[in-house]
Every structure is written in structure tokens, then in C-alpha cells.
Image (cartoon, rainbow, N blue to C red):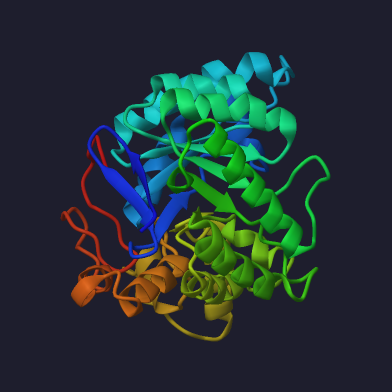
Amino acid sequence: MTRTVVESKTKTAVLGFDEPFCVIGERINPTGRKKLAAELEAGDFSTVEKDAVAQVLAGATVLDINAGVVYNSNPNPNETEPPLMRKIVELVQGLVDVPLCIDSSVPGALEAGLEICEGRPLLNSVTGEEERLEQILPLVKKYNVPVVAISNDDTGISEDPDVRFAVAKKIVERAADFGIPAHDIVVDPLVMPVGAMATAGLQVFALVRRLREELGVNTTCGASNISFGLPNRHGINNAFLPMAMGAGMTSAIMNPVALPVTQKAIAEKKAAVEAAGIILPEAMDDEAFVTMFGLGSTKPRAGKEMEAIRAANFLTNNDPHGGEWIKFNKAPAAEGEEGRGRGGRAGGRRRRA
């Protein structure tokens, strides 16, 4: 049975057909996050620290580390990314003890991350492009790490699932030429937005089955791609993830955290409540208020996608006796107490999560 093993200094995560679904936290990535990008260029890593801890407490078993900032002071990523990657990897593995996924389009940044990373990280990523294969597969062999293989090549991303399967097969075969086994290849079959392509879900489910049955490889995806551009994205993601798991997908790169309710949203809801003539207790704090009116929480907590994944693990017997499901649904601990309940987080400050 195919097992892809990734490790930190103290923990192991296994991707496999008979293993719990592996959640790869995506938040440490400045792409599309202007505030984070600006912080990183200024040497401020406070958001990275918060995101690392919050994702692990929400249930991420691996953390993706991407240092793809385009500096205003130096637009050359070949110069700026490697030292930044080194710094972030060193920082994150000092805060949390889960394995890491080193993520970059810059080969020098990938190697910088591999050099500093403890354990056996996942490398993200290689494609079917000839130049990329020649750059990345030697790194995979040199450091003896598993790699994400993305199903596009020199011709781009095909809408034909048979072409994407052929690209994945090519990468697996080329990896074998370097002595890299198929169990160390985690294929991303590329999830298309269902809003733009009505058959996107059906395509990826069929592709995942083929990749499992014909190539014997584990799979991953950027889970939120399926709902891009649509309303109620969480609703779509919550349906997609268990269906993908049922088809054989073994991991996803995703955000496990439900972000805190903003002060603006709280103020707007309070104004609406007041306008409706509802009188609230003077001692009611914001957390009690948002809980009462179903807005979420003022603190980071596990998102609804994590609930769907944990339920699917239970239903597929990858959570024997439902231990993780029961723990996930326990009432949150009181303020200042250790423990984690449904969507809650551990109380007290700790060095490692």
C-alpha cells in the first residue's frame, strides 16, 4: 500500500489510502496577501508566527511554507527568496512540531528550505516541464524527500483530464529514472473552478481514482480552487473535500482556520440588533455576542472544512472508534484552561503547538 512519509524532528505525517486525510495548511504564503508581503519585506514575522500556531491548533498536520515575496527594493526572487525561506523555515519549526512543505517556484529557495529543515519535508513542487524536471528531481533525490507533482507541462494546463493524467504519468516515470519511488510522488491533478467548468468536480474525482488505481500514487490539491468566484465558498468546499476523499484523494493544501469575526462585522450586527429593539446584557462580551448570533468567533478556530474532513475520516474508518471526532466536538475549554474543543484552541502560551 502506498505510503508517503513526511517528518519533522519529532512528528511523522503519513499520506496513504488507509490513513487519515492529511491537511496541509496554506496560510504562510504572501501570494495575494499584501499585508503579509509588506511585513515580510520589513522583517516582521508576527503574522507568520500567528498563522503557524493557529493552523496547527485547527488541525493541520503539515504546514506549507512559501516565501514568494516580490520585494519593492529588489524584484529579483532568485536573490531575495532563498534567505527569506531559510528564515521562515527556521522560525516556524521553532514554534510548531509538525512536518513542513517547502513551496517555491525558485529552485534556490527550495534548496535553502531543504538545507535548514529538520526531518523529511514535502517539496512543492515539480511540473512536467522539461526544465523544471531537470532542476527539481535531482533535489528530490539528493535530499531524499517526497515531492508534489503538478499535472501541467510545457503546453500549459490542459482542460482534458486524460492529458493531465498523461503528464502525471510522465513525471512518475521520469522520477523513477532518478531512483525516486512512486510512493514519494504526490500528484496534484489540478482542480478547476466549477463555476467556470461544470464538470470540474467530476473530472478531478475520476482523475484521482485513475492516479490511485493505475499509478498507485497519493494525491493533493489546492482545495479552494473548486469554489473560486462563487458565493458561499465554504459550502462548496465542505461538499468537495469528502467527495474527493471518497474518490481516493489523500491530502489537500488548504486553510484549516476559520478567521476571527472582524470588529466591523460585530459593530454592524450590534447596530442591527439595537435597531430591532433587542436589549443586550451590559456585561455581554464580543465572544458571547457573536456566539449568540451565529457569527463565528472572535478567535481563530477550526473551519467548517475541518469538520467535514474529520467526519469523513470517521465514516471511512480512518478515525477508529471516532476518537478524533469526539475530541473535536467537545465543548471549548474555559478561558485560561488547557485543551481544545470544537473549533476551540489550546489555552495558555506554549513554545510549540
- Percent position of residue 45, x then y: 47, 28
- Percent position of residue 304, x then y: 46, 70
Specify whether 215 is left or right of 340. right
Quarter of the figure with residue 114: top left
Specify whether 42 is left or right of 142. right
- Percent position of residue 186, x then y: 51, 49
Number of labels in the image equals 0
* Residue 69 in view: no
- The residue located at (47%, 27%) in the rendering is 141
Depth check: give the residue in front, 266 or 164. 164
Depth check: give the residue in front, 81 or 244. 244
- The residue located at (71%, 70%) in the rendering is 200
Relative to 279, is 179 above or below?
above
Specify whether 153 is left or right of 91. right
Depth check: give the residue in front, 264 or 334. 334
- The residue located at (53%, 30%) in the rendering is 178
Quarter of the figure with residue 279: bottom left
Relative to 350, is 290 above or below?
below
* Residue 94 in view: yes
- Percent position of residue 107, x then y: 61, 23
- The residue located at (57%, 22%) in the rendering is 109
Which residue of the protein is positioned furthest toward the front in this rendering? 177
Which residue of the protein is positioned furthest toward the left in this rendering? 337
